[in-house]
Image (cartoon, grey):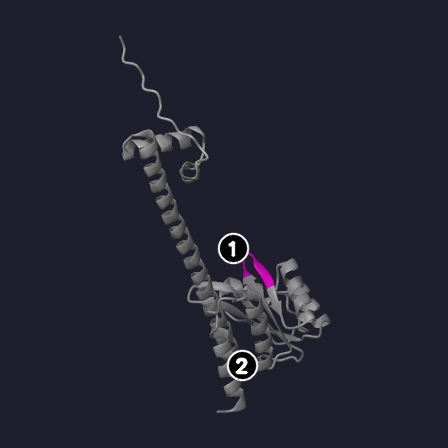
Amino acid sequence: MSVSDRRAREVFIELADTLVDDFDIIDFLDRLATRCSELLGVSACGILLVDHHGALNLVAASTEQARLVELTQLQNSEGPCLDAFTTGRPVQSGDMRQADTRWPRFSAAAIDAGYLAVHALPMRLRGTVLGAVNLFSATAGPLDDDTIALGQALADAASIGIIHQRALARQEIVTEQLQSALNSRILIEQAKGFLTHSLAVGVDEAFAIMRTYARTHNRRLTDVANDVVEGRVNIIVPAQESPPA
């Protein structure tokens, strides 16, 4: 195994490690930008990620020059990353000095920063596109097929890691919501027991009294139950209407 092959394997293992408790997505993407520049032999790398509104945002760049060029791309809504994100396919310009009407302002900014070629790779998993990786080169010329394939593999590996981490986060939220519901149910049962004893009523009636109190006072049932258990509220049995004479 060559040194480059060994290093590529190490990077893929590094990108797969998203199961740590202190996972930091910004640090993760910063490392991806650095590793792309290192392994692919390009001058710089920038990474854009879509937010929950569907808009791309700059999240990492291996150099300050690349960061500024990426911001120009976002500000002007034109550039290879936007095209790669929209189409889900790689987008390349081997020499931005040539008349390229696709991204005139982006190309000018990239050339001013010292970059002559750019290759954008979508960050994707099946039909989901999370963002795009921009590879900048100071020399003109397209990237070879092996470099493109390795770059896309890195982008895909990072995408899998991000989606996996998001799934874990959603699962944690669901688990927390379930536990909260269970805790609320236990609290309500305790309050029902308290009212059954203090008001000398049945369990169903105790619950109906507490629910009526919550609705009348525009409060959450769980909050009322907590106040009942803690003795912060005094609920009385509603007066019975006298039968008609």
Q: Residue at x 71, y 71 (%)?
A: 113
Q: Which mark is residue 7?
A: none
Residue at the spot x=44%, y=55% of the render?
A: 173
Q: Position of residue 59 (x, y in %)?
A: 59, 64
Q: Quadrant of residue 187?
A: top left
The kind of residue on which mark 2 rests is Thr
Q: Please say whether residue 207 is visible from this viewpoint.
A: no
**Residue occupied by mark 2:** 147
- The image quarter containing residue 69 is bottom right
> In the image, is residue 137 above or below residue 179?
below
Locate the C terminus by quadrant: top left
Q: State whether residue 224 is above or below residue 168.
A: above
Work out whether 198 lies above or below 137.
above
Quarter-of-image position of residue 93? bottom right
Q: Amino acid at mark 1?
A: His
In the image, taking residue 52 as reference, residue 108 lies left or right, namely: right
What kind of element bears circle 2?
A: helix
* Residue situated in front as seen by the camera: 129 or 140: 129
Place of residue 177 in the rendered image (x, y in percent of width and height, measured from the top left):
41, 51
Alpha carbon separation for disc pair 1 and 2:
31 Å
Query: Residue most toward the bottom?
Result: 1
* Residue marked by disc 1: 52
Q: Is residue 153 magenta?
A: no
In this view, the residue in front, 22 or 164, is: 22
Magenta region: 50-58
Among the two numbered marks 1 and 2 on one chain, the one whose residue lies closer to the N terminus: 1
Residue 137 position, x and y percent, is 64, 77
